[in-house]
Image (spheres, rainbow, N blue to C red):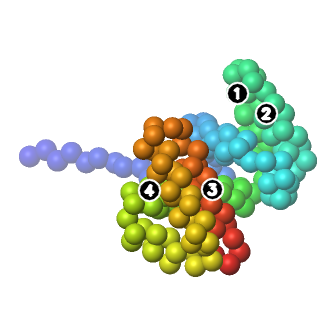
């Protein structure tokens, strides 16, 4: 009976060797991630970028990238931004992007909620008016009824939805009021 012995070598693991550099593929993935982070930063206003306390060179690179329209030039600028981001702690940047996305989602949810309330008011249901008054206790009931009547009249006459827009604006003003 032949027994075959195999010798296994213990390959040094990247975690075991602190001097081991990441592979070229890993470096490319990291740079792509930083470029994506830079792309996200392009959506920020100048004031929001300044609040992140980014280095001046990075701020200038971002401002330049916001002005560039040509695809190739934009790509090169994002490459440069990714290179600059290597030198910066990206945790606060990621937190700011996450907060902006959360705020946008909340805003969108509230917008859809107001649209649904407006549509419910336009159906003519008295419960909708009670719901609106419960939601916005400081609302002027007469003004709200007037806007609803206008919007319904325009719908029946197949006119442009001017009254519907005014009703939505009024609901949004009530929502944005500090006492809401």
**Residue that label 3 marks:** 169
Q: Where is residue 101 shown, x and y percent of the image?
A: 60, 55
Q: Dot 3: few (<14), some (14–19), or many (≥20) neighbours within 10 Å? A: some
The answer to which image quadrant residue 157 occupies is: top left
Q: From the viewer's perspective, is the residue at label 3 or at label 1 nearer?
A: 3
For marks 3 and 4, the one nearer the N-term is 4
Mark 1 lies on a secondary structure that is helix
- As drawn, the label of residue 75 is 1
Alpha carbon distance from label 4 to label 1: 49 Å
- Mark 3 to mark 1: distance in Å? 40 Å
Left or right of residue 92, residue 131 in this image = left
Rounded to the nearest whole Å, what is the CA distance between mark 3 and mark 2?
35 Å
Circle 3 SS class: helix
Graded by Cα atoms within 10 Å as few (under 14), some (14 to 19) or many (20 or more), the crowding at tag 4 reads many
| Disc 2 and disc 1 in contact, CB within 8 angstroms | no
Q: Residue 65: which disc?
A: 2
Say which residue appears at 69% left-offset and 22% top-offset. 71
Q: Nearer the viewer, residue 70 or 54?
A: 70
Viewer can see residue 175:
no
Earlier-in-chain disc, 2 versus 4: 2
Q: Which mark is residue 122?
A: 4
Q: Could you classify mark 1 by the number of other residues whose Cα lies within 10 Å: few (under 14), some (14-19), or many (20 or more)? A: some
Q: CB of mark 3 within 8 Å of CB of mark 1?
A: no
SS at circle 4: helix
Foreground residue, 159 or 65? 159
- The quarter of the picture where residue 79 lies is top right
Q: Is residue 175 above or below residue 53?
A: below
State the separation of the CA atoms marked 2 and 1.
Answer: 9 Å
Can you tell which of label 3 and label 4 is closer to the viewer?
4
């Amino acid at each position: 009976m032949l027994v075959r012995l195999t010798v296994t070598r213990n390959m040094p693991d990247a975690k075991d060797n602190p001097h081991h550099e990441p592979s070229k593929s890993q470096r490319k993935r990291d740079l792509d991630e930083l470029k994506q982070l830079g792309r996200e930063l392009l959506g920020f206003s100048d004031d929001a970028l300044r609040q992140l306390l980014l280095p001046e060179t990075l701020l200038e690179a971002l401002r330049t990238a916001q002005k560039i329209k040509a695809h190739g030039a934009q790509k090169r600028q994002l490459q440069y931004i990714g290179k600059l981001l290597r030198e910066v702690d990206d945790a606060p940047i990621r937190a700011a992007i996450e907060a902006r996305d959360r705020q946008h989602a909340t805003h969108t949810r509230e917008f859809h909620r107001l649209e649904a309330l407006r549509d419910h008011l336009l159906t003519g249901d008295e419960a909708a008016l009670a719901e609106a008054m419960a939601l916005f206790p400081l609302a002027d009931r007469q003004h709200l009824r007037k806007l609803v009547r206008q919007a319904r009249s325009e719908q029946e006459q197949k006119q442009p939805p001017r009254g519907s827009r005014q009703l939505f604006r009024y609901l949004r003003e009530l929502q944005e009021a500090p006492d809401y």
